Image (cartoon, grey):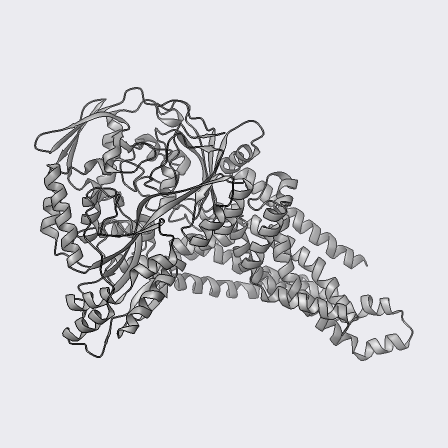
Amino acid sequence: MIKFIIRRLLIAIPTILLTITIIFFGLRILPGDPAVAMLGPEASPEAVEALREQMGLNEPLIQQYLAFLMDIVQGDFGDSLISGQSVSTQLFTNFPNTLLLAFTSIFFGCLIGIPLGIVSARKRDTVPDSSIRIVALLGISVPPFLFGIFMILIFSLMFPIFPSMGTGEGFWGQLYHLLLPSITLGLILSAALIRFTRSSMLDEINREYIRTARAKGVPEKLVIYKHVLRNSLIPVVTMIGLYITSLLSGAVLIETIFTRPGLGTLAIDAITNRDFPVLQGCLVLFTLVVQIVNLLVDISYSFIDPKIRPS
Amino acid sequence: MVRKNRVIVVLFLLICSAFIAAGCTNEESATETETDTKATAGGDGEKVLKVGLPSSPGNIDPHFATTHVEYEVVQPIFNGLMRFQPGTASFETIEGDLAESWEVSDDGLAWTFKLRKGVQWQKGYGEFTSADVKYSFERIMDPKVGSSQRTLFKYVKEIETPDDYTVILHLTQPYPSLPVSLVVDGLAAGAIVKKEAIESEGDAVDKLVGTGPFALESYSPGEKAVLTKHEDYFRGEPKLDKIEMTVMRDLTAREVALVNGDIHMTIGDADKLWLERMSKEEDLIIEATGSYNVSYFHMNVNIPPLDDIRVRKAIAHAIDFESYRKSMYDEDIAVPLTSVLSDDAYGHADIGKVEYNPELSKKLLAEAGYPDGIKIPKTLTPNVDAYIRANSFIQEQLRQVGIEVPMEQVDLPTWIPAIYGQKNSVNFQTGVTRVHGIVHLHRVWHSEGNANFTGYSGSDELLERAEAEMEEEKALELYKQAQQEIFDAYVSIPILAGKQINVRRKEVDLGYELKATGIYMAPKYETTDLK
């Protein structure tokens, strides 16, 4: 297992390097000048030129790229071009909020999505199955921002149960402020999970080993939860892993609507201001998260199904 | 079963660790969160005014601030030599701020300011003197510093400080509109900063020290700025303890927070339906003030076929801007623009409106040699809702008379350099006008103006004369002539002047009557209170 993890980590290095390279050059192709963004459009060309020089934007691209790589290796993402604050500090301040939102959303997504998926599969082609499928379809179709606005209007304005903004203070305060946004994002995830769990379970239910288990007189509950569910979970876990990336982008919208600081809003502001160091920092962090999640997904397979445990 | 439990334990631990990380981060990002705790607690009787900012401020150094949200943060921290009387934003209501009195020499080349005595800097930096004024203005004027406000001091030759409480600005030519350059809250320059603070090593909180009623306590870009009262403020101790400005990008989120009382004030939306809905809320006060937001349709005279005035006229007469205004806004929120200056700007003169006449448009096109229609070079447009609606309307109206305008939607950072660099052929645009007519006219229609989007230079000589004219009556006449010339040149078609929608909860007592603002939201002074 350790060898497997080390091998996966080594494979991750060129992937990350390639992604970082694409990020660096991709951003430089974007129209818009960070010096203009910083000084404002009415700044004189001389002032813009002086600032470009000061920011090192006039250096040859390859030289900027090498300096960028060296800094990253040392964990230094530079300073924001707009606020002058260290990018690492900004990432460190914002990332835990996004991470927290992502984790709790997955938690709520699984809590709602997997059981409903099981019910839907077990009660195939009945009224509960159709109802769950319609709700799931609706959940997939509604855009996250619209869903977030609905949730705020219902649970913060019409029935003021949850706060509509902020992160809260202390453990309970944070949890209270986190509930509505994470349930919102979790419900969106659960919609996809319901459909996935259902179809995956239906695939397994029709397999021969299940028929054999039933023929042997194994109780139905045991068949479903011990055999069918376990084997159905592999594609579901893969899906959750893949969903992490879209969850991060969904978090951008949810963070915006619920006025929560996070990596998403930080990245959006960085794009608007052409704040290259901050944007690079966010994207590199996103890349790392995706790599780590993929690794965790691979490792989790071995727990779910020992047959695919790496030797 | 053991494995299942393990997965649950791992998931639980991950969530807990994320909570702890979030908690640690908050503790470690020191000033920000310490402030948060106090500000949001409210239980200790602190008066905290909570403001929702519609977008994130970037650089809040007052000499670099360019957007209205940046000025929103800057305004309560800094003073200028002059200010608008609270609740107003006009050239006629400018009064002394850090300057107690001032006089102008007969030739208009020397402005002598007598400064207030006993004004204290925030954060224990001592007493304010003329050296601070000299340093601040020289910082703005230094090309190496790169402040975009430099042009507002273009005629300042030398700054003399004969004593601690006197400043003399020596100019290269008479410049009667100088006072608008010296107020902070009209999107202008003039904020007096402290050298020792601004040149110190540290972040915005260490550097941005002013003499205003509120001091910057924490600034977390993209999230929040917290200001605390400056107890030694020279006009008296502020009534509020803190001002907490939170970035809330979503209009619905701001709306809900305002109705629920999570925030006290924000910028409203000029949209008809929004205003209708919000005006039903009993706890809110909605005020439409001033009309400094003007919309124009600019045409670049250097890009053929727009170099032919007949083509520009044909375009102008083909668009029914009056229907556009009426369909989008309430009659009293967006008023017709009868000159290139808004009604409130100093020196505004009623010049007229461009008549909607598609037949005339077709005739003019034929005269210009395009009887079968014409295609204008591609133009970039911003992917902002209000602009998308306006540009779609314009494109369709032009198509009906045979004028094709290819438009490519881009994001704001791409669009802004395109318009300032005069790359766009035509350009619908909304912006804030400066309160003094000649400052705005020079900025937008002088060939060396900072915001000349059209390449127009036909009124340079007239604008230069107007800018230097000391005698008020003659100056106003020259401003009028300039407005007429620009109008007749068909380079910028005036469309509408929109009012600023200030919305706040009833418990907010501004301490003055709000008639206009130079920065979209009602300024916060020492008189502002929460009842």
Name the residue rendered at 38%, 52% in the picture: B330
Residue sitting nearer the eye, B303 or B6: B303
Where is residue B382? Give x, y as percent: 36, 61
* Vertical order, B318 against A273 (above or below): below
The answer to which image quadrant residue A238 occupies is bottom right
Residue sitting nearer the eye, B482 or B456: B482
The answer to which image quadrant residue A117 occupies is bottom right
Horizontal arrangement in the rendering, residue B45 relative to residue B419 (left or right): right
Residue sitting nearer the eye, A209 or B335: B335
Name the residue rendered at 17%, 71% in the picture: B364
Horizontal arrangement in the rendering, residue B393 relative to residue B139 (left or right): right
In the rendered image, is residue B170 in sight? yes
* Vertical order, B40 against A232 (above or below): above
> From this viewpoint, which residue is outermost toward the top?
B118
Horizontal arrangement in the rendering, residue A20 relative to residue B234 (left or right): right
Where is residue B36? Give x, y as percent: 53, 36
In the rendered image, is residue B60 in sight? no
Q: The N terminus of chain A lies in which quarter of the figure?
A: bottom right
Residue sitting nearer the eye, B90 or A65: B90
* Vertical order, A202 against B298 (above or below): below
> From this viewpoint, which residue is outermost toward the left?
B107
Where is residue B462? Give x, y as percent: 10, 49
Q: The C terminus of chain A lies in which quarter of the figure?
A: bottom right
The answer to which image quadrant residue B193 occupies is top left
Where is residue B18? Give x, y as percent: 62, 48
